[in-house]
Amino acid sequence: MGHILDWIVYKDTMANVYTPFESYNLPYDIGCKLWEIIGGTLAWLIDLIFPGNVVSEWLVSDAVTTLLGLIVFMLLIFIVAFVSTLIVLWEERKVLGRMMDRRGTMVGMKGFLQCVADGLKTFQKENTIPAKVDKMTYMWTVTLVIGVSVLVLCMVPLSSRWYVVDYDTGLLIIMAFFALAPFFILVSGWAQNNKYSMIGGMRAAELMISYEAPMLILITTSALLAGSFNINDIVYAQMDSVWYIIPQVIGAITFFTCAVAEAERVPFDIAEAEAELVEGWQTEYAGMKWGLVMLADYMRGSVSCSMFVILFLGGWTLPFIGDGPIPEIVFLLKAYIVFFFMSYARAALARVRTDQILNLGWKVFLPLSIFNLAVVILLKVGGVF
Amino acid sequence: MMSDSIVPVKEIEERMETDKMWLTMGPQHPFSHGLWTLRVQVDGEIVTDAEPIVGYLHRGWEKETENRTYPKIIPMADRLCYAASMTYTHLYCMTVEKALGIDIPEKAKWIRIVADEVCRIQSHLMWLAAVGTDLGSYTVFLWSMREREFFLDLNVKLCGARMTTNYPRIGGVRNDTTELFDRDILRTVERFEKALWDIVALVDDSSIFVSRMKGISYLTREQVANMGLTGPAMRGCGVDFDIRRDDPYDNYDLVDFEVPVLKEGDSYARYMIRIEEMFQSCEIIKQAVKKVQALGKNAPYRVKTPSRVPAGTTFARLEDPRGESLMYLVSDGTDKPYRLKVRSPIFVNVSGAKAMSVGTRVADVPAVLAQIDMCLGETDR
């Protein structure tokens, strides 16, 4: 027996012995607090009926709080990432509409609800699997393409308190997961028993070998400037000195181009070039599978922009202000501004050819990124950073 | 050693052509604007062979005309090509007039020139839109289609229909220019000359667009002559020939305009020719509209013609937006043609698909074949 407030106690989440994070984590904290209210109320009710039972004590224990806190944490991280992807989708449609002298989407809330309508439509479609595909491979590859995209989207930290992992190699882990999708696309193109898909899959691999090397070099330069692969360190190093876009302008432009290629967007969407390859490697995917692949594309676009913001635009910090009250909003707004340029490129440019992107990657991007590396090393040796 | 193996691997590979693959593009394919198939043989990404297959839209047009009286064929001629309906109707009326041996009023000639050039511009704009999508830019598509709307509105102003106009008649045109038509057309052309520069700037200033077209799919003058290509594809290879100038019909000999010719012979040259032709069409429209205005309101625009055509054979040709179109009429003295043969420029030009696409890459196939400006209605008839 007792008062309800005896059961609902706000504890410091960091004092919880089972807390899996080393620093303060906002979504996890929200989850724990939420469970403290719900679990505390439940425990109080059970204690009212069966005074002095063990279950009530167990419900408000550290272990259960951590478990339920983690579940809410995962949901929160996913929902925020998902909604921000939908905003990116809406932004692109509106920007393209303005560029192309039309209105863009018009369904509810200035066209924002169009993505909901699209989702519902693709969800209602029949789940067709062509007769002669390799069914296992056909399914797991697309699942992994979508899964990896969702994973890497959720792994991008929105601020020092809104993150999933905080390793010292966080940047490398994100880039590693980000670069996984082309392998699955290659296998998927093979599994579909379709010539267009196969060429699309091959092109995805071709595309990857052209941008991956310069992109990794550019990531290394930013890490070199900050002296760490930890995303927090990179962001706060930029707050302390200057946004890294200023010492490495060439690097930023090259990285942006590589990021567009990484997200497989126009002008580098050669793997799904609809003019000649129908829908490229996605040709045989219909209904919700196609809808999710499409969404995964935007997730990857969103991650590309986020990486650009982290590496070159100071992440969630603002000059002279620092973190500010809501750094997550600052981060997302910066990412949307970068994405505006991606949409702009999509509206203004045509698709490049496969041999052209290979030429571009190895003859332009790679020398530029190495030049950028040299500049950064000089700056570092000269003691500027 | 290969020869020592029991299985004759090399022979099998040679017989099966395992390193090459046939891709069937069409009839349901985003690149085929209309129902046609292009089978391309690819070695990796490089095209080694190509074979166009047309005929999905065969309606028996030529046979059907044999059961209709002469005036009833005019609306059918509209349906030969929805993008060039005005020129085909014009061509048909011209053929019958030639068979009848009559001369049409001055005003009708000038109005036909105006209508033809409006048709040429809107047809070229649709081609530009197709080039945009084939190169992966939706903006070029929408901007061109937007400009095209203004010219379709001019069609509405002139004859009430947007695409299948049914406007020329045997012996003239159906109606006089409507009120304020000359004002509207001059305004539209003036506006268009500026707007086209916007699109050209979007395409020509972008190195991606240019690199996708420049230096691929070369054709020589000899190839063009052997395949019988006409229109912009021919003029892009340095053949200086335009029926409007070299074999003038109606009053084209009184109009001052230039025929754009380029010697490069690549995909980009064909693109440049068409863009320049649109500017030249604007010039022609401006001159022709002045002539229509000078003739005044009450000038005759149509003459009565007999319904029976004397027996004999006639042919007439004109410069279609896509090339040289020709009609060959065999009349037997009744009010129906005995035989009416259409020479469609695209049906001939598409036979150059192999020469154009071999050696390019799969990604170039839509970009190169967009320069044919495919229209299936007239190809399959």
Image: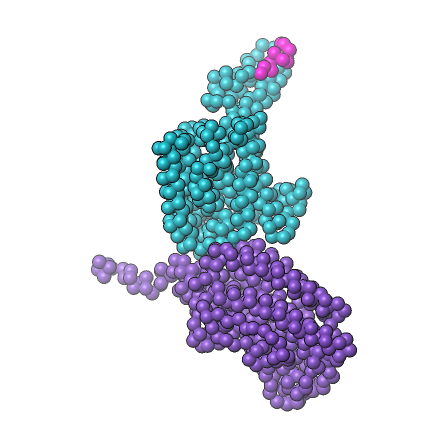
Chain colours: A cyan, B purple
Which x, y percent locates residue B15?
Answer: 33, 65
Q: Is residue A182 visible?
A: yes
Taken as a whole, is the magenta stretch helix, strand or loop? loop
Up-down relation of residue B9 to residue A265 (above or below): below
Q: Residue at x 29, y 60 (%)?
A: B9
Residue B297 in the figure: left or right of residue A185: right
Front-lying residue, B37 or A96: A96
Up-down relation of residue A187 to residue B187 (above or below): above
Front-lying residue, A125 or B314: B314
Residue extending furthest right?
Answer: B298
Quadrant showing the C terminus of chain B: bottom right
Query: In the rendered image, which quarter is residue B102 located in?
Result: bottom right
Q: Residue at x 48, y 70 (%)?
A: B262
The number of callouts visible is 0
Which x, y percent locates residue A157?
Answer: 50, 31
Front-lying residue, A110 or B291: B291
Front-lying residue, A313 or B34: A313
Magenta span covers which residues? A1-10
Which x, y percent locates residue B90?
Answer: 64, 76
Q: Residue at x 46, y 52 (%)?
A: A270
Quadrant showing the N terminus of chain B: bottom left
Residue A8: in magenta span:
yes
Q: Is residue A155 visible?
A: no
Residue B157 in the figure: left or right of residue B117: right
Which x, y percent locates residue A225?
Answer: 40, 33
Up-down relation of residue B265 to residue A318 (above or below): below
Q: Residue at x 73, y 77 (%)?
A: B295
Residue B158: in magenta span:
no
Residue A91 in the figure: left or right of residue A283: right
Query: In the rendered image, which quarter is residue B170 located in?
Result: bottom right
